[in-house]
Image (cartoon, grey):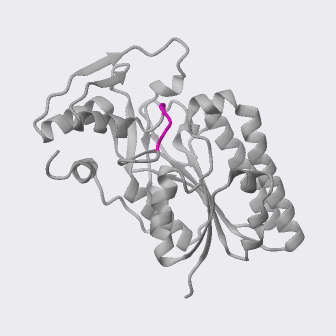
Amino acid sequence: MGKREIILIGKNSFIGQKLAENLAEKEVLHVIKNQINYYSKPNWFNLIKNNTTIVFLAFENSLSAQKKNFYSYNINILNFFNLLDKYIKKNKIFPNIVFTSTVTVYGDTKSQIVNESFNLNPKTEYDMSKIFFEKILIKLSINYNLKITILRLSNVFGLSKVSKQKDRGVLSKIIKNIKNNKEVKIYGSGKYLRDYIYIDDLVEGMIKCIKNTKPGTYNLCSGKSYSLLYIVKKIMKMYNLKVKIKFIKFAKNSSQIEKRNFIGSNKYFSESFNWKTKFNLYKSLKLIYGDKL
């Protein structure tokens, strides 16, 4: 079987860079960098062939930026999908599409185990945007029988050189502070549960669904949930460190989603793509730190 043609939109994100590194070695990869081109003047559409896979990672994941520019930002993306719709209809070329969504579309799920049939209950502009474009893509799949894969990602972590958003990548920032013997700041009690997936596991899962297209909506998560407080104490115990922890009250206008618990199920994705996580919490932290700090 020859190499696959893949168009990656959003390489500059943490996930995008890792994914591009892996795909470039084995597939024909086209990276679309300029936002103007992929939103309003998609002159790269000539790269699309039947069964080309478009991986859409270009999405503002800063909660504050989404709130500030909610309408203008989402109109740009809607315009992009409208142009893609017209291109497909005119040229009768049918790409596969992989779109990254988020598990926060489920809202505050308390202590329930969440699978893909769980009710959606968005709490932020970011989550509302993701759900809206999930539905747009499902409509495209019905209109043209496209193969659309929607991946709802949990908290991705690993040391990153590209993350600039102050309100994202919390675990990576905490790990960095511990490594540098700096005070760790935790909002609230630190006992809220999150599903943290190591970047290498996530990228492997994405590559599997690119190579073996199975349309659908999937949770791509580790299937294990931990509190930030537990992780901080785990790191200190592993490396015999003692770092000051400062607990900070949530601001009055903070989103409810910041106080959520999430325990996800990855069973559907795992069975569909013969995938399982290789890096448990201990192993992934060990990889980030190495044997010595």
Which quadrant would residue 113 be assigned to in this image?
top left
Q: Does the magenta stretch include residue 135?
A: no
Q: In this view, does 273 lie above or below 175?
A: below
Q: Is residue 118 visible?
A: yes
Q: Residue at x 49, y 32 (%)?
A: 109
Q: Residue at x 28, y 29 (%)?
A: 229
Question: How far across and down, in percent of the image, does residue 31 sit?
Answer: 61, 64
| Left or right position of 17 against 217 | left
Q: Which of 215 and 199 is in front in this view?
A: 199
Tally the marks. 0
Name the residue at the left extreme.
240
| Left or right position of 57 against 195 | right
Quarter of the image with the C terminus in it: top left
Q: In this view, does 293 lie above or below 31?
A: above
Name the residue at the top extreme.
252
Q: Which of 177 and 267 is in front in this view?
A: 177
Question: How far across and down, in percent of the image, does residue 180 sit?
Answer: 23, 35
Q: In this view, does 241 lie above or below 266?
A: above
Q: Which residue is drawn at 80% across and 56% down?
A: 41
Q: Which of 51 and 9 is in front in this view?
A: 9
Question: How far across and down, in percent of the image, does residue 139 sit?
Answer: 78, 55
Quarter of the image with the N terminus in it: bottom right
Q: Which region shows up in magenta?
A: 163-167
Q: Which residue is drawn at 19% across and 27% down?
A: 243
